[in-house]
C-alpha cells in the first residue's frame, strides 16, 4: 500500500485478542493500533503482545521482529591516565610549533614588498584619445567671474545647472586660480554624519575626511549632489556655516580662514524636477546661507571641449555636433547632457564604429527613438 503523506485514513477492524472494535492507521511507514475514537493504542496489542506504552506498531504484511535488548550502560568507565612524561612531551611539541609560526610570520612581515610593475594595455590597437586640456574650460565659462567674486569674499555659494555643464570643474578651476587646494565631498541619501566629520577607530585612530582637511587647513570645499543628500547631514553643515565650527571625533575645530565652501547640484533646491526625480526640496533656512545662481550652458565652451575630444577629426566633430544641436532643439522628458556629445566625439574619432552605434550608446534610448520618428 502506497503511503502519500504524514497520516492515512484510519481503517476499521477488530482486535484479534478481545474482539473489540479498533482501527489501524499508518504513520511514517509504521502501522499502529488505535481505539475506535482515535485515542491511545489498544491494550494489549494482539499482534505484538506488549502494552500500548511500549508498542512501536506492527506491519500486517511482515513477520514480527524481535526488538534487541538494550545494551546496559557500564557503571564505571576505565580511562587510561596518560603518563606525565607524555603530557610534557605534547606541551613541548605545541610550544615549538607556535614558536615556529611566530618566527615565520616575523620573516614575512620584514620581507620588502616589491613595487608593482607598470603595465601598458593596448585594446584592439586603437590609439588612446587625448585628455581634455586643463585650460579648455578654466575661467572660460561666463559664470566664472561671479563664482570667483563669491569665493574670494568668503561667501558660501550654491551653483545649480544641467548635468555636464562643468560645475565640478569650475570648483577645481576656482581653487587653481586662488592658489588653494581643491577638496570634494559627494553627498548621498544614506550618508551618515561621519561622511563629513570622520570617525574614531577602535584603536583610537582618527579617520579624517576631505571636509576635515579643507576645514582645518584651508582650500575650496565642494559639496556635490547636495539635493540628494541625507537631511541630517545638512543639519550638521547648516550649523557649521553659521557658527564656523565643526565637532570632529577628537574635538571641535574652527574653520580655517582660507576655507571656501561651494555647493553644486542639478536642481536649485526649491522645487522638484521631472528630469532629476531623485532630487528633493531643501530647507529654506539652509538655502538662505548661500549665494545662489544658475550655471548655464556655454555653447562656445561645449564646442571647444568637443573639438579637443575629436582630436583633429573634423568629420566626426561635425557629425556629432550636428546631431547634438538637433537634439537640443527639441523638448524631451529626459535630460540631454553635453556628456553625450563628448563621448560620441571620442568614440567616433578613435574607433571604426558607425555613428548609429555610437549615438545609441551615448544618448538615452527615448531620445534615439524620438529622433527616428
Image (tube, rainbow, N blue to C red):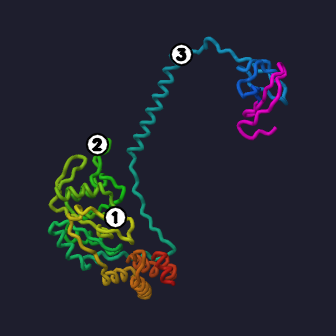
| N-terminal label among 1 and 3 | 3
The residue positioned 28% from the left and 75% from the top of the image is 295
Any mark on residue 333, and which? none
Q: Position of residue 42 (x, y in %)?
A: 76, 22
Q: Quadrant of the N terminus?
A: top right
Q: Position of residue 56 (x, y in %)?
A: 74, 24
Report the span colored magenta: 1-30
Where is mark 3, residue-wise? 83
Q: Quadrant of residue 135?
A: bottom left
Q: How busy is the neighbourhood of tag 3: few (under 14 within 10 Å), some, or many (20 plus)? A: few
Any mark on residue 204, and which? 2
Q: Nearer the viewer, mark 2 or mark 1?
A: 1
Where is mark 1, residue-wise? 280
Q: CA distance from mark 1 to mark 3?
A: 77 Å
| N-terminal label among 2 and 1 | 2
Q: Position of residue 61 (x, y in %)?
A: 85, 30
> Do the numbered discs 2 and 1 sit on residues whose CB atoms are within 8 Å?
no
Q: Nearer the viewer, mark 1 or mark 3?
A: 1
* Predominant SS of the magenta segment: loop
| N-terminal label among 2 and 3 | 3
> Residue 11 in magenta?
yes
> Do the numbered discs 1 and 3 sit on residues whose CB atoms are within 8 Å?
no
Relative placement, left or right, of 200 versus 60 is left
Q: Is residue 131 visible?
A: yes
User: Which residue occupies the foreground of this view, 295 or 27?
Assistant: 27
> Residue 173 in magenta?
no
Amino acid at each position: 500500500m502506497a503511503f502519500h503523506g504524514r497520516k492515512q485514513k484510519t481503517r476499521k477492524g477488530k482486535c484479534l485478542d478481545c474482539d473489540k472494535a479498533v482501527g489501524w492507521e499508518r504513520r511514517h511507514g509504521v502501522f499502529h493500533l488505535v481505539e475506535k475514537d482515535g485515542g491511545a493504542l489498544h491494550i494489549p496489542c494482539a499482534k505484538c503482545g506488549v502494552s500500548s506504552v511500549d508498542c512501536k506498531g506492527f506491519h500486517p504484511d511482515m513477520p514480527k521482529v524481535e526488538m534487541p535488548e538494550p545494551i546496559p550502560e557500564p557503571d564505571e568507565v576505565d580511562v587510561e591516565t596518560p603518563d606525565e612524561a607524555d603530557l610534557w612531551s605534547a606541551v613541548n611539541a605545541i610550544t615549538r610549533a607556535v614558536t615556529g609560526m611566530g618566527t615565520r610570520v616575523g620573516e614575512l612581515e620584514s620581507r620588502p614588498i616589491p613595487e608593482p610593475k607598470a603595465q601598458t594595455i593596448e585594446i584592439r590597437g586603437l590609439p588612446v584619445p587625448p585628455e581634455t586640456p586643463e585650460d579648455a574650460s578654466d575661467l572660460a565659462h561666463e559664470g566664472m567671474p561671479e563664482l570667483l567674486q563669491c569665493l574670494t569674499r568668503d561667501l558660501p555659494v550654491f551653483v545649480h545647472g544641467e548635468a555636464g555643464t562643468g560645475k565640478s570643474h569650475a570648483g577645481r578651476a576656482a581653487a587653481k586660480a586662488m592658489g588653494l587646494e581643491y577638496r570634494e565631498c559627494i553627498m548621498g541619501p544614506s550618508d551618515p554624519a561621519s561622511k563629513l566629520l570622520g570617525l574614531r577607530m577602535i584603536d583610537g585612530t582618527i579617520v579624517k575626511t576631505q571636509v576635515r582637511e579643507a576645514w582645518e587647513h584651508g582650500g575650496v570645499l565642494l559639496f556635490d549632489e547636495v539635493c540628494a543628500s541625507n537631511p541630517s547631514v545638512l543639519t550638521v553643515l547648516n550649523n557649521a556655516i553659521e557658527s564656523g565650527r565643526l565637532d570632529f571625533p577628537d574635538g571641535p575645530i574652527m574653520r580655517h580662514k582660507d576655507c571656501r565652501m561651494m555647493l553644486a547640484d542639478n536642481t536649485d533646491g526649491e522645487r522638484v524636477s521631472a528630469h532629476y526625480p531623485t532630487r528633493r526640496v531643501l530647507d529654506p533656512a539652509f538655502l538662505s546661507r548661500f549665494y545662489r545662481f544658475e550655471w548655464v550652458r556655454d555653447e562656445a565652451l561645449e564646442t571647444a571641449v568637443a573639438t579637443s575630444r575629436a582630436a583633429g577629426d573634423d568629420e566626426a566633430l561635425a557629425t556629432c555636433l550636428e546631431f547634438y544641436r538637433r537634439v537640443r532643439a527639441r523638448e524631451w522628458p529626459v535630460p540631454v547632457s553635453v556628456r553625450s556629445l563628448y563621448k560620441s566625439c571620442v568614440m567616433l574619432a578613435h574607433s571604426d564604429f558607425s555613428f548609429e552605434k555610437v549615438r545609441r550608446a551615448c544618448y538615452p534610448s527615448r531620445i534615439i527613438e524620438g529622433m527616428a520618428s
